[in-house]
Amino acid sequence: MTILFAVLAGIVSFIIGGLWYGLIFRQAWLKAVGLSPSQIEAAGNGQKEMLATALIEIVTACLTIVFLNALTINPISSAAIIGLLSVLSALKNYLFERRPINLILINESYKWICFLVAGIFASLI
């Protein structure tokens, strides 16, 4: 059951990512990374990147859920804390790279939401 829920959490995170970067924040993200839609299209269809991203989301969800289930505190609260730690850890890179605040907010809020998704699925086990 744990593996099934972990795979489902990874798939849900991947779908959220598609909506996040492909629909909700597409224009803001493109502007923040300095790309145009034509540059993205010229780079190819992105199938390899999407497959790799889906696998990474599934592995991340699996590891997170296994870790959360080993703890004795609420999985959703734990996931929120782990996500926050991950976000804070990434911030130092953004600061040194002098990335725009919009990029940080888009990328890191998505990351935090993915950890929450894993926490939600972990709480169902």
Image (cartoon, rainbow, N blue to C red):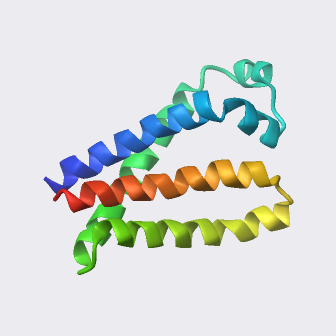
Q: Would you place residue 72 above or below residue 25 in this image?
A: below
- Quadrant of the frame with the C terminus: bottom left
Quadrant of residue 21 within the rendered picture: top right
Quadrant of residue 20 within the rendered picture: top right
Which residue is depicted at the point 74% across and 66% down? 93
Which residue is depicted at the point 74% across and 49% down? 103
Query: How far across and how far down the image is residue 104, in percent?
Result: 71, 55
Which residue is depicted at the point 45% across and 52% down? 114
Q: Is residue 71 left or right of residue 94?
A: left
Residue furthest to the bottom in view is 72
Q: Would you place residue 69 above or below residue 123 in this image?
A: below
Q: Would you place residue 4 above or below residue 98 in this image?
A: above
Q: Is residue 109 left or right of residue 118?
A: right
Q: Is residue 116 left or right of residue 110?
A: left
Q: Is residue 14 left or right of residue 28?
A: left
Which residue is depicted at the point 60% across and 32% down? 24
Query: How far across and how far down the image is residue 96, in percent?
Result: 83, 67
Tell how many labels: 0
Query: How far across and how far down the image is residue 26, in percent?
Result: 67, 31
Along the line of sight, the residue nearer the viewer: 58 or 74 = 74
Residue furthest to the left in view is 1
Query: How far across and how far down the image is residue 37, in percent?
Result: 75, 22
